[in-house]
């Protein structure tokens, strides 16, 4: 009788450990969600994958420990382990991880801005001659356009003069 009680006690403690493990995994999923913003579809997909993973993992651990003999106290142990984890360690763990994530984001933001300073300066230096070249190119295009207009106007006037001369010759006859 003593051996049966001790094996069931070990199984209950194992189920509490499974609950704690499920809580840790869920906190890791929450950390990923804090780092990378997800649309609702992906959040639901992550939740589904989380529960599938936890179900298989929990069943596998129960299979190893108790040949998958499911008892009500196993579910109570899993719920108790997850509840204990979320009420104690999860608060501390998520607080620390949130601070670390915010610190890393701030450092990355500063590095990004530090890297952008020389890039922006280089772009400004390159823009000056490029703007000068572009302005000269636009001026050349404008003067070429004026020249084409003047040539077209001169050609049009010459054709009009020829028509006028022909008209006047035809009038004299």
Image (cartoon, rainbow, N blue to C red):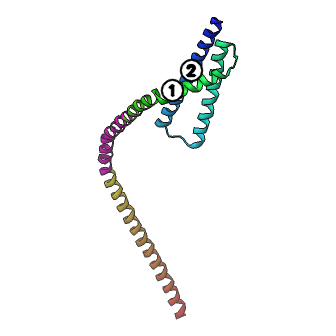
Count neighbours of disc 2 (C-alpha within 10 A) and say few if under 14, some if 14 to 19, many if 20 or more: many
Residue 121 x %, y %? 29, 44
Identity of the residue drawn at 55% across and 27% down: 82
Residue 145 x %, y %? 41, 66
Q: Is residue 111 magenta?
A: yes
Q: Is residue 149 magenta?
A: no
Identity of the residue drawn at 36% across and 57% down: 137
Q: Which mark is residue 84?
A: 1
Q: Residue furthest front?
A: 1
Quadrant position of the C terminus in the picture:
bottom right
Marks 1,2: beta carbons within 8 A:
yes
Q: Which residues are magenta?
A: 103-129
For residue 49, above or below residue 142? above
Q: Residue furthest bottom?
A: 172
Q: Which mark is residue 16?
A: 2
Count neighbours of disc 1 (C-alpha within 10 A) and say few if under 14, some if 14 to 19, many if 20 or more: some
For residue 101, above or below residue 125? above
Residue 40 x %, y %? 58, 43
For residue 13, which quarter of the picture? top right
Identity of the residue drawn at 50% across and 26% down: 85
Q: Is residue 130 left or right of residue 97?
A: left
Q: Nearer the viewer, residue 153 or 16?
A: 16
Helix, strand, or loop for circle 1? helix
| Distance from the alpha carbon under mark 1 to that under mark 2 | 9 Å
Residue 68 x %, y %? 69, 16
Q: Nearer the viewer, residue 30 or 127?
A: 30
């Amino acid at each position: 009788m003593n051996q049966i009680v001790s094996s069931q006690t070990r199984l209950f403690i194992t189920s509490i450990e499974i609950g704690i493990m499920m809580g840790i995994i869920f906190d890791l999923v929450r950390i990923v969600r804090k780092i990378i913003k997800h649309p609702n579809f992906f959040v639901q997909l992550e939740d589904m994958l989380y529960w599938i993973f936890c179900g298989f993992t929990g069943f596998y651990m129960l299979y190893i420990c108790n040949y998958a003999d499911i008892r009500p106290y196993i579910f109570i142990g899993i719920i108790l382990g997850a509840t204990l984890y979320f009420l104690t360690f999860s608060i501390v763990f998520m607080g620390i991880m949130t601070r670390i994530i915010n610190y890393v984001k701030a450092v990355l933001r500063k590095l990004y801005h530090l890297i952008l300073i020389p890039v922006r300066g280089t772009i400004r230096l390159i823009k000056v001659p490029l703007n000068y070249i572009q302005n000269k190119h636009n001026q050349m295009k404008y003067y070429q356009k004026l020249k084409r207009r003047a040539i077209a106007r001169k050609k049009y006037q010459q054709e009009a003069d020829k028509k006028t001369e022909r008209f006047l010759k035809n009038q004299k006859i």
